Amino acid sequence: MRVICTGGSGFIGTHLADSLIMKETNFLNLDICEPYKHEHVKYWKRCDILDLDNLRDEFQKYKPTHVIHLAARASMEGESLDDFRENTDGSANVIKAVKATTSVNRIVVTSTQHVRKPGSGLPLNDEDFDPLMLYGQSKVITEQLTRNADLDCIWTIIRPTNVWGPWHPHLVYGLWRLMQKGLYFHPSGKPVIRSYGYVRNVVWQIEKILNAPPAIVDQKVYYVGEMPSSQLEWLNAFSQSLIGHDVRVIPSGLIKTLAGIGDILTSIGVKFPMYTSRYKNLTTSNIVPIAAIIETFGDPPYSLEHGVNETVQWLEKEGFI
């Protein structure tokens, strides 16, 4: 096995690199950014997936047998689809590089659960889309490019759920820091159900897909993560580990009012921790068909407690808390 991973310097890619290196897998990370970890640098080549000629050259030189396409712009902020060219044109380039490289026999392409909006219900089929904002729309294009490419190799699309763990680029400065300072509060109301994914469990699932018999994974779509659970259960696990007690729950009407104030402040350039889209995120369940990957490969190996402990230890080691 010779693995190329695009975006191997990112959050999921860092943990995937750890696993591949530990297993002594032949591995090359193509990323525009240097890896987080110094020990990963020797496996990295600077490469922009928007530069087709360079990308194709790297594929031709390395001759991968397996490709994991993680590189993306994973942000909800953007004014047009042009802001998400990494997800559209970049994915098209990765597919072109794969088609031009005869050694490739398998590719895993990363999409997102946000090809359907939270609250839109279970999809009727793999192409039943209702994307969340421009980011979700750009990932619909990623999936369509994959399906329509007439690839000669085995291909699988993965849709990560709410993935978390060490090296997460946003939770460090948002949720976890607010919790650690005692500033996080949660709206009351009916339980919100989500599928979460500790990053090492998601990597375990990716590697299972990478090594599975073709009939199980070829031209399939898998959500990756863990079985649905209460959002408050996940939040309380972190709150207990960080500050020794559950999160504070306050009336949802009060938080909704604060969200309206936050919208006004945001419109004039003033940062405020609550706004309408965040309020909706906190109060809307998102049920996805995660059971398929659990039924295929079994329960992932790491518990919520294990993941929280590892994450908090990392936060302490890196000086974030």
Image: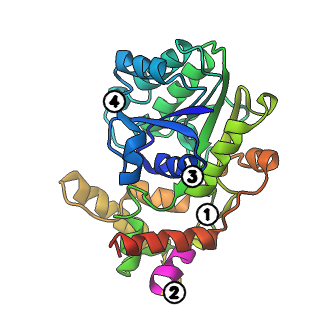
| Secondary structure beneath label 4 | loop
**Residue beneath the point at 50% across and 47% down:** 17
Secondary structure mostly taken by the magenta-highlighted segment of the chain:
helix
Give the position of the C terminus as an image quadrant. bottom left
* x then y, percent, for residue 252: 49, 71
Question: CA separation, marks 2 and 4?
Answer: 42 Å
* x then y, percent, for residue 43: 43, 40
* x then y, percent, for residue 262: 30, 61
- Disc 2 and disc 3 in contact, CB within 8 angstroms: no
The residue pinned by badge 1 equals 192
Label placed on residue 80: 4
Q: Nearer the viewer, residue 293 or 9?
A: 9
Question: CA separation, marks 4 and 3?
Answer: 40 Å
Q: Is residue 247 left or right of residue 34?
A: right
Mark 2 residue type: His
Mark 1 residue type: Val
Question: CA separation, marks 3 and 1?
Answer: 37 Å
Q: Residues within 10 Å of mark 2 (few under 14, many from 20)?
A: few
- Disc 1 and disc 2 in contact, CB within 8 angstroms: no
Give the image quarter of residue 90: top left
The answer to which of marks 1 and 2 sits earlier in the sequence is: 1
Question: CA separation, marks 2 and 3?
Answer: 36 Å
